[in-house]
Image (cartoon, coloured by chain):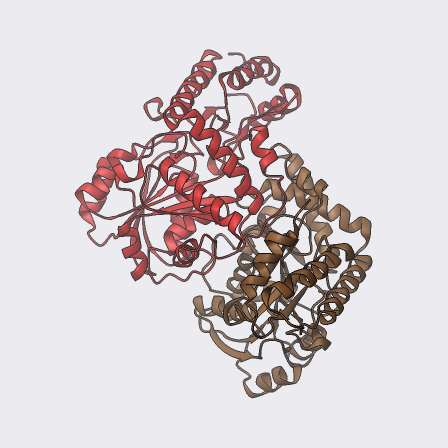
Chain colours: A brown, B red
Amino acid sequence: MAVNLRIPGPTPCPEEVLQAGAKPMINHRGPEFREMLLRITDELKELFYTKNDLFILTASGTGAMEAAIVNTLSPGDRVLAVSIGEFGDRFAEIARAYWADVVDLKFDPGTYADPDAIRKVLNADPRIKAVLVTHNETSTGITNDLAAIAHVVKGEFNKLLIVDAISSIGSIPCPVDEWKLDIVTSGSQKGWMAPPGLAFVSVSQRGWEAQALSRMPRFYFDLAAAKRYLQRGQNPWTPAVSVVFALDASLALIKKEGMESVFTRHAVVAKKTRDGVKGLGLKLLADERYASNTVTAVRVPEGVKAADIISRMNSEENTVLAAGQGKLDGKIFRIGHLGYCTEDDIQGVIDGLKAVLPKVGFRG
Amino acid sequence: MAVNLRIPGPTPCPEEVLQAGAKPMINHRGPEFREMLLRITDELKELFYTKNDLFILTASGTGAMEAAIVNTLSPGDRVLAVSIGEFGDRFAEIARAYWADVVDLKFDPGTYADPDAIRKVLNADPRIKAVLVTHNETSTGITNDLAAIAHVVKGEFNKLLIVDAISSIGSIPCPVDEWKLDIVTSGSQKGWMAPPGLAFVSVSQRGWEAQALSRMPRFYFDLAAAKRYLQRGQNPWTPAVSVVFALDASLALIKKEGMESVFTRHAVVAKKTRDGVKGLGLKLLADERYASNTVTAVRVPEGVKAADIISRMNSEENTVLAAGQGKLDGKIFRIGHLGYCTEDDIQGVIDGLKAVLPKVGFRG
């Protein structure tokens, strides 16, 4: 029986995607790779709902976050880092590592980023050049109202808007051009149903203007090099060819299913997860109005150990759940339901929890 | 008939390596991955002939080169960049991008880095803190005498020695501890017979001392984070899991063959390549005393176009050769013979060239 891998990435890959990743190596500077790279790039742009440039980097999503920052900012630039959890904090940390002047706007775990609060900070501090924001916070299971945030950041203040959409885009609507998102990042192991190893970053015209002025040091993640090489159908550095093969196959599946159907499936599966968990007497971490359709964070009931739930789900129910990160370690467990995920997969999780919970001391 | 992929990476992967890369995804923060990551790390250390720390990054070899620099140097640090080709130049470029004060020592393409010349520069400029050097220059097919260079840099001057061994270590002897190499980089798609996507970097005690003082900005490539996470059997950011699976299988094959046998096989195959090419009346780019055992650069004869040789070898002989890079574009073609390569593979290349050369205007 296959393991039910229910973490928010790496997500399970369809068998045909795994097999595509096992194709023999080819020259990454030859015609076959060129055709594939250009086609995949166009497909990703379509699925990002954007006409902006888009680049495929060999890195995790964190690499794409670094690329987003170091290509658009200069040391000393004041930047607003909106955080509702671990990944929002990471965005701020990257900017600080490269000597940005970071203004933090933090919201409690399980809550969403309030656009009014963002407006207030931007009003009070006109020196802020750019805003970093997480679309979907994987550590808490919250999807921010990015449309409303973008309306403030772009529509009212016309600041550079840099978005971590790593665990949202491709699973949750995130129309890059409609919302005027300048830099948007994602990773192959999330909703895209491919193995980890590739990260994506889209760059608006405004993003390129920032890039031209940016003085943060960069080499591996230099998007000007990525652009120059993409014109000849290449990456500047040797790409993860087997993951590109796999992504090629997974994008074909996504296109076949249709992006709207993919969004609907994620919404249905997520609701089933939340309803199932609540039906067992458990509580969600997330403010349910903003609960994520890609990952659900569940509060660990009093008197129960998170590690016991996770290890028994693994050993007895063949189901892999994710632990809490950082300050939430031990306080929550998380169920990933992005990418290759069906209602049956979620039923398996709920049934498993039903069997395991009484054994770890949960009295309902 | 399988393509004879004879470029210096990505190299062909044995079928069992490709199939290992198609295994279902697992939790990169779970026990199964932990066991694999720790085991592979130990195996790589053994094959690097080192007791130093070693980290597996999700990136190309260029990412490991960047990691080597940004973890050990500070802006303004004077560093000697020894270059005999494109990859030596790249090392200098990365250091400059991060504001190092780079002193260039360049040698003509096809020649080797003279240890006496390095001694002279180090003698003349005591402010130099570190030396960047390429062990095997993929763009020209030269293997530097790294033992002699290390003897000067470490033995006589005790400077920090940072080595690009991307296309050497694992194929050509490069005993890290014996030669006292502080930072050594490689990539999965070279002699390691795995797909691209992972890069390796080893760090000596002296390297860690430099790391503690280094002020170059870094996040994705921060080796302190890599060290912290490796203690719990994890990578800081999501690794390219499928490539790790593949590498696990390829390292098992290498260990089975035995490192000494791998070195001998590379030497035999390389000699066969050089002899074969010369037998056809072609000339090598490399000073043959320093000719590489992983890649051979062949001068394009007068009146012949490199692109014609490469494209006919591809379409008529099912053999993929590499073009020249940078200033050598059009002047050479290159034959990769590292990793998964037999004498038969090389015989195929020579036979192919014999058939193709007369058709592209070569009169021998």
Observer-nearest of B297 and A324:
A324
Horizontal arrangement in the rendering, residue B52 relative to residue B20 (left or right) = left
Observer-nearest of B183 and B120:
B183
Percent position (x, y) of residue A338?
70, 58
Horizontal arrangement in the rendering, residue A297 relative to residue A331 (left or right) = right
Above or below: residue B46 compared with residue A352:
above
Quarter of the view holding residue B153: top left
Percent position (x, y) of residue A238?
54, 42
Horizontal arrangement in the rendering, residue B63 relative to residue A139 (left or right) = left
Q: Residue at x 44, y 57 (%)?
A: B229
Quarter of the view holding residue A324: bottom right
Q: Quadrant of the N terminus of chain A?
A: top right
Quarter of the view holding residue A80: bottom right
Q: Residue at x 54, y 54 (%)?
A: B238
Percent position (x, y) of residue A53?
66, 56
Above or below: residue B71 compared with residue A118:
above
Percent position (x, y) of residue B93?
41, 50
Answer yes or no: is residue B240 visible: yes
Above or below: residue B154 compared with residue A62:
above
Horizontal arrangement in the rendering, residue A62 relative to residue A278 (left or right) = left
